[in-house]
Amino acid sequence: MRELEVPHDSVDDRLAARLGALRTERGWSLDELSRRAGVSRSTLSRLERGELSPTTAVLGQLCTVYGRTMSRLLMEVEAEPPQLVPAARQPVWRDEPSGFVRRSVSPPHPGLRAEVIEGTLDAGAALSYENAPVPGVEQHIWVLEGTVEITVGGTTHTVREGDCLRFRLRGPSHFRCPGPLRVRYALMIVLP
């Protein structure tokens, strides 16, 4: 199960409410959202009621349907982010089953198009996203430690410590840490 390391002011409850509001704003039933996102109706219902925390994969599918990056969705449930983001206040989100940890180093901010994320992926772990959350979003991935294999546009790139891969994301993507150690990388996202 994953957890969000922020003060106990119930970010999960606000996330559940925001997911429900996004569906309602579009006039979609749970069945319609289930069809669009490829997530079961019962899972969506439990997510919106705050009975279940989403995995990275499910949250990624919902972000794609709603046309948002994961960071932007998480920002929508946070208070207005300050200009200076001290390390101790950078939200950290863990998806234990997938071996993924995501730190929002420079969260999205109204009027700004870029954000910075630190990601770590355990050796042997993999993440897949079916679609770009926002078609044409620009991404720069700078590997700080280890190695990661990233597949975008049907091409797999082996990105090693110090290397930077940059691209516009328009479709599926896949991240895999071949090991033997975990990978730690900085991800810069720039909205189109």
Image: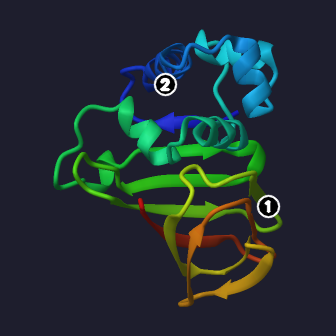
On screen, residue 55 above or below 88: above
Q: Residue 50's x, y, as percent? A: 58, 14
Mark sitting on residue 15: 2
Q: Please name the residue that numbered disc 1 is placed on.
A: 125
x 50%, y 22%: residue: 22
The C terminus lies in which quarter of the figure? bottom left
Question: Which amino acid type is shown beneath numbered disc 2?
Answer: Leu
Alpha-carbon span between mark 2 and mark 1: 26 Å
User: Residue 47, image x and y in percent?
Assistant: 64, 18
Element type at mark 1: loop
Q: Nearer the viewer, mark 2 or mark 1?
A: 2
Q: Residue 67: where, in percent of width, then height?
A: 53, 42
Q: Nearer the viewer, residue 23 or 54?
A: 23
The relative height of residue 147 versus residue 24 in the rendered view (above or below) is: below
| Closer to the camera in the image, 1 or 154 | 154
Crowding at label 1, few (<14), some or many (≥20) Cα neighbours within 10 Å? some
Q: Residue furthest left?
A: 83
Query: What residue appears at the point 76 percent right and 71 percent down from the top-left corner?
Result: 177
